[in-house]
């Protein structure tokens, strides 16, 4: 049992570990308004696609709990505004829109129930949000179990960004694969890409693996090619913010070059993600919206300028790895292999493997 959590409900509001200040400090935030929850997502206090979805769901439950509306119509207007605000936070992580959609469906059903009132709808929304949180952790554990045949004794696993317990309701997607292998006694070791510019690998992946006693070594992003060339990487596993229907994978900027390197060096490249990350309405990677973040995350390092004033920077926060470079996609329903369009459609329809 970990002695920390990523995001949770409390009677005071939505509670979360502030990921902006890790590993220096372990501080929890209590967010009492939808606006504060939205800003926590925008500012990366909470991040990682599944954790963003869970947080948004709890944000909608918070809006309902705090509402002073005396009738269902007025509550409906407030909840729609809450969902719209939360939907404007980060465009790439489809789990956000998936979770908001589920909350909207839950509201619609709760409103139709006999004797429905603002209070009963709020109670139903809280239960729905907590269910999304529970399901997310259960999916991560299922992914970990499903991935065991892919991870050999002593495997040296390279990962990028943080797709761990900090990016989910618990256990992690890519780091769920690592945790399951570690718990099975496989003696695995992790190479964590630093992940410029927000350093999710150096600050967050290293922190949570170290907390669990899982061996982890941090490298800067430009070291991966050299280490693969030296034969020091057995497999790559990453998470995803959105997987298109054809299997193209959006993930933290720097994932695509890793996949190219992995192909060049014959290293398997795996993606671990719950089915809530698979977007059947996005046909391929070209249709995935890529978030562009602000200048300061690139132009400053620890609040010190590292780019001359006035020189422009670019900051696409995600890239798209074409499906042809992905060896397999691990979901809670099993291991999907190419052709991904068929395998993912089958998993979304409820069958395992593919
Ligand atoms: O900008 P971030 O930190 O939210 O980006 C997170 C990632 O890219 C993760 O790899 C992805 O969301 C999967 S998390 C299980």
Image: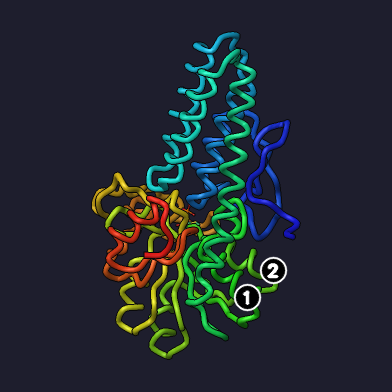
Q: CA distance from mark 2 to mark 1?
A: 10 Å
Residue 213's x, y, as percent? 70, 73
Picture disc at residue 182: 1
For label 2, the residue is 212
Pointer 2 local density, CA inside 10 Å: few below 14, some 14–19, many at least 20: few
Choose top left, top right, bottom left or bottom right for residue 262. bottom left
Residue drawn at 49 percent across, 63 percent down:
161
Q: Is 273 rendered above or below residue 145?
A: above
Residue drawn at 38 percent across, 50 percent down:
349
Q: Nearer the viewer, residue 173 or 41?
A: 173
- Whichever of callouts 2 and 1 sits on the residue coming sooner in the sequence is 1
Residue 327's x, y, as percent? 35, 72
Q: Is 236 rendered above or below residue 123?
A: below
Choose top left, top right, bottom left or bottom right for residue 329. bottom left
Q: Is 298 rendered above or below residue 115?
A: below
Residue 21's x, y, as percent? 63, 53
Residue 132 seen in render: yes
Taking the image as shown, residue 85 lies to the left or right of residue 325, namely: right
């Amino acid at each position: 049992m970990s002695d920390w959590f990523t995001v949770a409900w409390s009677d005071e509001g939505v509670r979360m570990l502030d990921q902006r200040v890790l590993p220096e400090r372990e501080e929890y935030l209590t967010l009492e308004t939808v606006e504060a929850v939205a800003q926590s997502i925008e500012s990366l206090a909470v991040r990682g696609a599944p954790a963003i979805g869970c947080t948004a769901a709890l944000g909608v439950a918070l809006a309902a709990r705090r509402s002073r509306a005396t009738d269902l119509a007025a509550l409906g207007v407030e909840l729609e505004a809450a969902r719209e605000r939360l939907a404007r936070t980060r465009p790439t992580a489809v789990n956000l829109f998936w979770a908001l959609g589920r909350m909207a469906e839950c509201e619609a059903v709760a409103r139709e129930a006999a004797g429905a009132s603002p209070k009963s709808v709020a109670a139903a929304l809280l239960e729905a949000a907590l269910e999304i949180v529970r399901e997310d952790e259960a999916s991560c554990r299922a992914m970990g179990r499903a991935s065991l045949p892919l991870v050999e004794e002593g495997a040296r696993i390279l990962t990028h960004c943080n797709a761990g317990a900090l990016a989910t309701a618990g256990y992690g997607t890519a780091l769920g694969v690592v945790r399951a292998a570690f718990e099975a006694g496989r003696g695995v070791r992790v190479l964590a890409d630093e992940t410029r510019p927000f350093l999710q690998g150096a600050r967050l992946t290293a922190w949570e693996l170290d907390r669990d006693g899982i061996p982890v070594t941090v490298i800067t992003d430009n070291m991966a090619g050299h280490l693969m060339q030296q034969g020091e990487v057995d497999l790559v596993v990453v998470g995803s913010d959105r997987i298109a229907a054809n299997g193209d994978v959006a993930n933290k900027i720097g994932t695509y070059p890793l996949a190219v390197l992995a192909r060049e060096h014959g290293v398997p490249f795996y993606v671990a993600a719950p089915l809530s990350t698979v977007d059947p309405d996005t046909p391929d990677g070209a249709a995935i919206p890529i978030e562009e973040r602000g200048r300061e995350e690139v132009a400053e390092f620890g609040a010190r300028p590292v780019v001359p004033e006035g020189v422009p920077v670019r900051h696409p926060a995600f890239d798209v790895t074409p499906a042809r470079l992905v060896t397999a996609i691990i979901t809670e329903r099993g291991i999907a292999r190419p052709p991904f369009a068929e395998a993912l459609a089958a998993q979304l329809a409820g069958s395992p493997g593919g």
